[in-house]
Amino acid sequence: MRQHVNPLSSFFQLPLELPGPEQLFQRPEQPIHLDIGCARGRCILALAELNPDWNHLGVEIRRSLVASADRDAQASEHGNVRVLFCNANISLAQWLQALPPGRLQRVSIQFPDPWFKRRHRKRRVVQPELILAIAAALPTDGDLFLQSDVLNVIEPMVALTELCGGFSRPEADARPWRDANPLAVPTERERYVTEQGLPIYRVLFKRNQHQLPQLTLLESRWQEIDNPAEAISQRA
Ligand SMILES: C[S@@+](CC[C@H](N)C(=O)[O-])C[C@H]1O[C@@H](n2cnc3c(N)ncnc32)[C@H](O)[C@@H]1O
């Protein structure tokens, strides 16, 4: 099995200024689908081909994958897809904040690296700062799609998304997990898991109209749930 990149290592802490929609896409005014941790980008590239009226951005921390994925993206005839290298936890918040209101319409986080050990929880991609940045950038009814084949991975993602208060689950989105992928193209990991006949856990959240909490408040509430022992020792 390949070694996951440790997003906390110093190399990946360097913030990168990601180009805005005008520099990325032929028709920057189109709605954006952002796929976080897109690996070789096959899913986001195929979605871009199917949906020329949307723009698509994949971000990925493994530089070697980004080089070939973005070469394919830049060759796309619609000019509606790019794949960029970055640590989503370091460089995305600023990019999201600079987007024109309503431009971002969909975010997907699919089969993120399985850092399910408690001592590795800070390496998980869904962290309070990122979920707040996504929620602040999505308009009401914007989509946040999460899927994983590892329960210990998706459960904390869902718990943190619900704790931030900015997302609701539509009535039709069956609990505990929705059956089908709302996206027209499965990811590489999804194909593999499906071929093995293993379960996949999915949720499609919709941005609601609730106000978002301050980051420090969400962080401390999240710590009480995710790591109660540390939260108690910090209070003492
Ligand atoms: C298990 S793979 C899944 C890839 C793809 N989404 C799929 O479903 O086939 C998770 C991907 O997320 C990337 N990743 C992990 N942490 C990241 C971070 N902080 N920022 C950007 N990408 C990250 C990994 O390098 C890896 O390519």
Image (tube, rainbow, N blue to C red):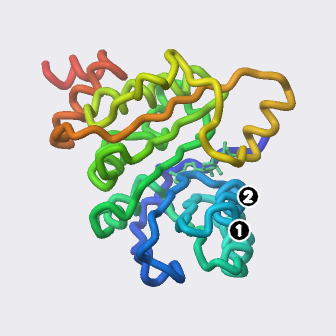
Q: Which quarter of the rendered picture does the N terminus lie within?
A: top right
Assign the C terminus to one quadrant of the image: top left
Answer whether labels 1 and 2 touch (C-beta < 8 Å): yes
- The residue lying at 71 percent from left, 66 percent from top is 64
Q: Is residue 158 placed above or below 27 in the rendered structure? A: above
Is residue 155 toward the left or the right of residue 212 in the image?
right
Which residue in the structure is indicated by mark 2?
42
Is the residue indicated by label 1 positioned so its CB lies within 8 Å of ligand 1?
Answer: no
Circle 1 residue? 69
Looking at the rendered image, the disc whose residue lies closer to the viewer, 1 or 2, is: 2
Describe the element under mark 2 as helix, strand or loop: helix
Mark 2: amino acid: Arg
Which residue lies at the image location 61% right of the left edge and 79% below the top edge? 79
Q: Report whether the residue tagged 2 is closer than 8 Å to ligand 1.
A: yes
Q: Residue drawn 74% across and 71% down?
A: 68
Figure check: 128 above or below 77: above
Amino acid type, callout 1: Ala
Residue 128: image quadrant is: top left
Q: Is residue 172 above or below residue 205?
A: above
Q: Is residue 98 left or right of residue 184?
A: left
Find residue 115 and report its horizontal and vertical position in percent: 56, 33
